Image (cartoon, rainbow, N blue to C red):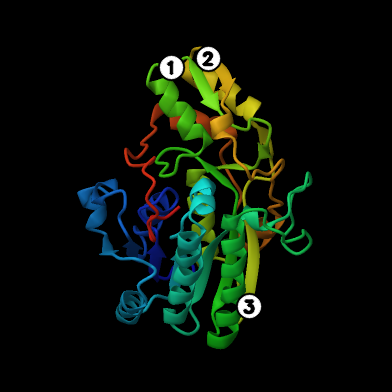
Amino acid sequence: MTGHRSRILITGGSGFVGRPLVRLLSADHDVLVYDALRFGRDRFAASELGRIELVEGDVRDPDLVRRVAETFRPEVILHLAAIHFIPHCERDPVTAVTVNVAGTVNLLAAAPKGCRFVLASSGAVYRPDEAPHREDDSTLEPSDIYGLTKLQSEHYLHHFARAKGLAGVAARLFNVVGSGETNPHLLPEITLQLKAGKREVRLGNIWPKRDYIHVEDAAAGFAALALHGHVAPGEVLPVNLGTSCQHSVAEILEHMRQAAGFDFRVVADPSRIRAVDRPFLAADIGRIEKRFGWRPTRTIRDAVHDLWRHPDISPRMFMPTADAAGGR
């Protein structure tokens, strides 16, 4: 698809990863963003809105999803819309399932035959392991509702790929960090507390080690999965999207101290401890490097410093609503 101006439908395109992905692709391709706009229309500048088609809609609405797909006729679908914040999924599993699974089925049912369908899956589909996870070797055993919904979505992708000749990619995304966060994850929580003048941050579990990827690298990874490499019709290729590096919360806090230019104290807050948490999570990224020509270019230090300099955190980030197309 290199050099070809493709028609690309992006669900959740106003979200954390979706917005830089839209900015990356809209210069050279015809992009339609399908999003519930939970965080408002002002996440895109007027000049950016002039380059894209924006449809406000819920992925749980099969009729609207079908009409948009029939009218736009996408060659590529990047499906990022979902409920991503694990505590929200645990508190409201029914909504998590209807948005993440039924919403995916609606989009798959509407997808034109033969198009490339890139599903934003998650590293949460894997069983926790100290070794980096490999797509075809590591055990698939989610430990939370969110991971379950993503694994179920992958199963439906396999079904529809066979039935409709879709070129499917299950992009197993790991932890994303950087400016523009739309969910109350660890680093935006710390940033908001420190920016508010606090010198004591209250956190839950601080022992897990994670694979953190810069949001701009994540967007570039999705773009590579959409436009490069070969995926055969009827095939579904699971692909890790991460860095292969694990970082502890202690390391991240040290980077935050360096970015902020001052010290702060960490206090364990039992009310913030997740009932479900993973001790280790990291991606083996050999497949995306070899088949799609992508590798990360930014470090965890870059991500933390960029977040500190330009948080761009949605003021609605901590609202307890669950929106269907409020994308990642």
Q: Does 255 sit left or right of 128 as displayed?
A: left
Q: Is residue 185 left or right of residue 288?
A: left
Element under label 3?
A: loop
Provide the residue designation for mark 2.
264
Q: Amino acid at mark 3?
A: Glu
Where residue 281 sits, quadrant-wise, is top right
The answer to whether any part of residue 233 appears in the image is no
Total number of numbered labels?
Answer: 3
Disc 1 secondary structure class: loop
Q: Which mark is residue 101?
A: none
User: Which residue is rendered at x = 66% and y = 34% of the image?
Assistant: 247
Q: Residue at x 54, y 32 (%)?
A: 271
Tell me which amino acid carries mark 1.
Lys
Mark yes or no: residue 70 visible.
yes
Taking the spot 64% from the left edge, 25% from the top edge, the residue there is 250
Q: Which secondary structure lies at badge 2?
A: loop
Q: Residues within 10 Å of mark 3 (few under 14, many from 20)?
A: some
Mark number displayed over residue 235: 3
Q: Position of residue 36 (x, y in %)?
A: 32, 59
Compared to 232, does 229 lie above or below?
Answer: above
Q: Which residue is mark 1?
A: 198
The front one of 276 and 61 is 276
Locate residue 272, reporting x and y percent: 54, 33
The CA distance from mark 1 to mark 3 is 51 Å
Q: Amino acid at mark 2?
A: Phe
- Residue 231: x, y in percent? 60, 74
* Tag 1–tag 3 contact (CB < 8 Å): no
